[in-house]
Amino acid sequence: MTIEQIYTGCLAQGAYYIESDGEAAIIDPLRETAPYLERAGRSDAKIKYVLETHFHADFVSGHVDLARKTGATIVYGPTAKPSFDAHIATDGEELKVGKLTIKVLHTPGHTMESSCYLLLDEAGKPHSLFTGDTLFIGDVGRPDLAQKAADMTQEDLAGLLYDSLNAKVKTLPDDVIVYPAHGAGSACGKNMSKETFDTLGNQKRTNYALLAETRDQFIQEVTDGLLPPPAYFPQNVAMNKGDIPSLDTVKEQGMRALTPDQLELLAESEGALVLDTRAPQTFKDGFVPRSINIGLGGDFAPWVGSLIPDVKHPLVLVCEEGTEDETVTRLARVGYDNVLGFLKGGIAAWKAAGREVDSVTSIPATEFAERFAKGGLKVYDVRKPSEFEAEHVDGAATTPLQYLNDHLAEFSKDEANYVHCQGGYRSMIAASMLKARGYHNVIDVAGGFKAIAETEVPRTDYVCPSTLKK
């Protein structure tokens, strides 16, 4: 028996490879099929099943393409209604993979079709549970994403999740290993651990949601403090229900090399957004005017999904040379297929063509402290409300990056706007967005609040709740 977790850190997503006696099953694959085909090829195993725990919202799955390339059967739990050929399993149905058995447990709550897959070893003993977004390490799946599709409230769905966990999951032996679809950093939960697997027994003892004594307490706790989901989530769900184009096809278009003239033409004629994926402190020194910086080295795909609402919006890329393929792949993972190409030669080619270049002023925290001491600075904190509430610069305004467009009226077009986050990644995204919208007097604080905390800038951990509104 072989079980491998294939974890993708930038999406905090776990896919799984299960193999026995020459047969394999893949659970919740990402869009690129090569890792799974290569893994099965190393063991000369045939991929028999592609098991989906639910219709994913935060990434586009590779189930359709993987089934097309291998002849594997796509499996969903009860109530799923995909538009492609798939086996819709019944609750309790058992599937054979070599000498192993995979039992389908229908666990509605996160979504109505959500299901867990219980792996039984060769002796029929429960070994591990692949929980998708039903149960995470330290958390459970958020119950607010499927409200419209289910015609239910988040409280209704939370109640169903409570029932599923208590009837189907908590009754399993404590030594069963829990393998979830996500870890810390995913927007599919609010309290996930950095650990990517655990025993069920330990989760029963430590997971706040599993410790809830009543259904009402559970509903209250799992719905409290939920932030609005990223705008791209419903679009990814719709894609995962349909016949998803192959990543190979997406790359054919996205890997088109563009001259400065071609990039400019696409930006003007197609309304393409110029997305610059270089590191923040590289971007600041020179970039295509009105381009948006979301660095490939950070939580790239989730921030693209949060800040570019329409996955079909045309994009043209400015990348560090050699990262173009990785960029197109990461965008496709979250459904951004309409990449029209990348600037060949990067920003150097743009400059060589004599084109206008914009920049962002970025100052160290020590210089910020000196200016702050003189008074009168307009400081904007683009961290999450919870980060701001824990501690922030005295007098700073909370303008969370994911809601920046709702806060534009708070920024000044005349005076300097000092922007910071925790470490410098998000603040440069914010600075680029502000510059693109005509707020040119923007100053980034390099190193963010982490660096500010090492200076003498006054800080407080008290915040009026009314300032934390969206």
Image (tube, rainbow, N blue to C red):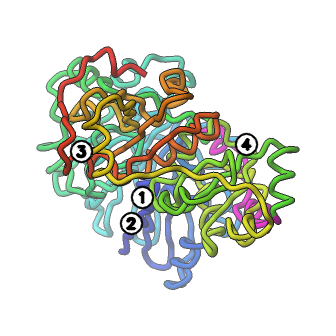
Q: Mark 1 points at which residue?
A: 14
Q: Assign the N terminus to one quadrant of the image.
A: bottom left
Q: Which mark is residue 5?
A: 2
Secondary structure of residue under mark 3:
loop
> Which amino acid, by three-letter code, is at mark 3?
Gly
| Mark 2 or mark 3: whose residue is earlier in sequence | 2
Marks 4 and 1, how far apart in space? Answer: 26 Å
Percent across and percent down for residue 467 are: 33, 19
Q: In this view, does 394 lie to the left or right of 467?
A: left
Q: Residue at x 64, y 52 (%)?
A: 358
Q: How far apart are marks 3 and 1 (CA)?
A: 15 Å
Instruction: Please report contact status of discs 2 and 3: CB closer than 8 Å, yes or no.
Output: no
In this figure, which residue is indicated by the disc labeled 4?
312
Q: Do the residues labelled 1 and 2 touch (CB within 8 Å)?
A: yes
Q: Dividing the picture into quarters, in which one does residue 318 lie?
A: bottom right
Q: In this view, does 110 lie to the left or right of 78?
A: left
Label located before the other in sequence (1 or 2): 2
The residue range painted magenta reads: 237-259
**Residue ID for mark 3:** 138
